[in-house]
Amino acid sequence: MTLSAASLQKLEGVHADLVKVLEKAAEQDGVAFVVTEGMRAIKRQRDLFVHGATTTMKSRHLSGHAVDLAVLIGGEISWSWPLYAQLALVMKKAAGEVGVPIEWGGDWRTFKDGPHFQLPWGAYPG
């Protein structure tokens, strides 16, 4: 699989290291995905916060250090949680191969966010 034109467009402004991980993950067999959101404007973040879709106004999306992905099954988006655990394995493997640390929102203790992947604050404070 390769990243679609729509996914590539949504990666505008996303940190180059995270893009490298996504490109490597797209080369892997097993889980097809699309980018649903990359860099986010403060207004969009505020709207998500007000509607309870996020718990923070300090999202890594605001600085281009996070992406949200959706798994594709037969060309259609699926929100089935086990699929996101599989995608996380692919993303973590790809990150290791390109030498870029990532965090998966599904590993968080609270507000588990299966579609969310980000560069860690410690390694990428910006």
Image: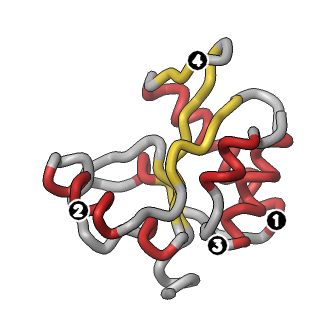
Alpha-carbon span between mark 4 and mark 2: 28 Å
Q: Nearer the viewer, residue 113 or 82?
A: 113
Find residue 96 and report its image quarter. bottom right
Secondary structure of the residue carrying numbered label 4: strand
Tell which tag, 1 or 4, sits nearer the viewer: 4
Pointer 3 residue = 15
Secondary structure of the residue carrying numbered label 1: helix
Tell which tag, 2 or 1, sits nearer the viewer: 2
Q: Is residue 99 above or below residue 50?
A: below
Q: Amino acid at mark 2?
A: Arg
Q: Nearer the viewer, residue 87 or 50?
A: 50
CA neighbours of label 4 inside 10 A, class few (<14), some (14 to 19), many (20+): few
Pointer 2 residue = 46
Q: Residue at x 38, y 46 (%)?
A: 113
Q: Nearer the viewer, residue 73 or 42?
A: 42
Q: Residue at x 75, y 39 (%)?
A: 4
Q: Residue at x 54, y 23 (%)?
A: 77
Pointer 1 residue = 98
Pointer 4 residue = 76
Where residue 102 appears, as percent x and y from the top left, is: 59, 64
Where residue 51 appears, as percent x and y from the top left, is: 16, 47
Q: Residue at x 50, y 87 (%)?
A: 126
Mark 1 or mark 4: which comes first in sequence?
4
